[in-house]
Image (spheres, helix red, strand yellow):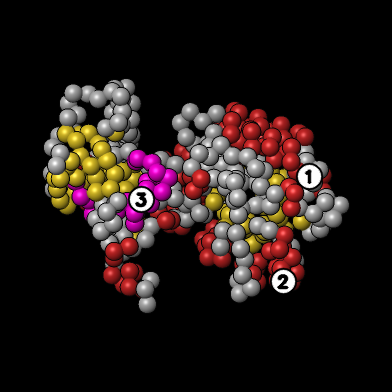
Amino acid sequence: MGLLNLFPFGLGKENTKGKSSIQNPIPFTCLQYLPSPAYVLDQSLLENNLQIIKNVANKAEVEIVLSLKGFSMWSAFPILNAANFYKATASSLWEARLAMEEMGSPAYTYAVAYTPEEIEEISAMSSHLTFNSMNQYQSFATRAKQVNENISFGLRVNPEFSEVETDLYNPCAPGSRLGILLEDLPPKEELSSDIEGFHCHALCESSAEDTLEMIKAFEDKFKDYLPNLKWVNFGGGHLMTRKGYSLDVLVQALKNFKKRWPHLQIILEPGSAFAWETGYLLCTIEDIVQNGNIKTAIINASFTAHMPDCLEMPYKPQIIGALDASLPYQPNEYSFRYRIGGNSCLSGDYMGDWLFDHELQIGERLLFNDMIHYTMVKTCTFNGVKHPSICIIKNGNILFRRNFNYSDYKSRLS
């Protein structure tokens, strides 16, 4: 869609008194030109993340590919391609197809369960095919090879280690259905030579120190199998673009593993790290209601429909220019307290509380920070609420990528 010529965008200065460290990343005088609600990706922030990821890959001599489950905004894929990121992981047939069509490369595919109806098509679009169980491997490996004789098979294994506190996001929680336990693998002498790799995913927005411990747990359990493999995929959850992340620890952990197993190709597949803090959800206050001493600003977006991780994780997102009311330091000028409510009928579709330095008004616009990774891929049209538009900030302009309308909603339900 069209471009609007706006003056340059940029991050504000660091604030040391408890305010949001990102102030007015989009000039408020220009917010009127954006549709509302809208997801807004800042290309310069994405490019910064890509440079960090590229540096890790080069220093550690590993392959890092995009996980589509975390970021599948394919209108931004040319930005990744320009940084030499051409490959992606897929968790389904449609993601594998997206990788082929929009990134130009077959996918590194792992699915919890493949189906007889899809196995041939997904194999044709994949360079790697990882199975979640021995039963899945035995059921589909032959058909997959018939379609793609060059495909590389792997098994997802469960190292029974994780520092993830929320079970909803913990791949190695007790009783997890994800990955094969050591005790359920065939003896190494009986493992088919067709199995060329192990996939180990145990993290979620985790630290480099967690990655180091995960590698230790993986190696301790599965070291007897490693001499006969060609590759190891250490999954996602490596949040290497987060401020304060120990990049040197991550690089050294990967280099040390490579020294011990020089014949193995090492693959990482982060999702959040690519799009971490690269954009925003812009919304508008449509009403302000009061119940007792609680004031709720109702926006034209929904937490359950457009920001589901906030309720599922749960976590409280940052609103640009506002303060989390639970922070220990509260400047005196931030004295206006509001809960933020979504526009669906779900009673729990709200978050709170925030402090503002002024009284909110109907028609005022709010910016939620860090709303690109995972948020966009998990949206829905519950209640028939309007889906946010999609925009990219590019070279001082706003590129409107997509506006959604009634036909998009209706087509999902026919």
Q: Earlier in the sequence, mark 2 or mark 1?
A: 2
Q: Is residue 155 magenta?
A: no
Q: Earlier in the sequence, mark 1 or mark 3?
A: 1
Region of the chain picked out in magenta, as a range: 297-317
Residue 333 visible in the current orientation: yes
Asked if the residue at tag 3 contacts the one at tag 1, i.e. Cβ–Cβ closer than 8 Å, the answer is: no
Residue in front for this viewpoint, 172 or 233: 172
Q: Secondary structure at mark 1?
A: helix
Question: For the point 32% across and 22% down, which residue is it?
Answer: 16
- x then y, percent, for residue 269: 58, 47
Q: Quadrant of the C terminus?
A: bottom left
Asked if the residue at tag 2 contacts the one at tag 3, i.e. Cβ–Cβ closer than 8 Å, the answer is: no
Total marks in image: 3
Eyeballing the image, is 209 above or below 133?
Answer: above
Looking at numbered disc 2 in the image, what kind of residue is underneath it?
Arg
Gap between marks 2 and 1, in whole Å?
26 Å
Q: Is residue 302 magenta?
A: yes
The residue tagged 2 is 143
The residue tagged 3 is 307
- In this rendering, position of residue 253 left or right of residue 22: right
Residue in front for this viewpoint, 208 or 49: 208
The residue tagged 1 is 226
Label 3 crowding class (10 Å Cα cut-off): few <14, some 14-19, many 20+? many
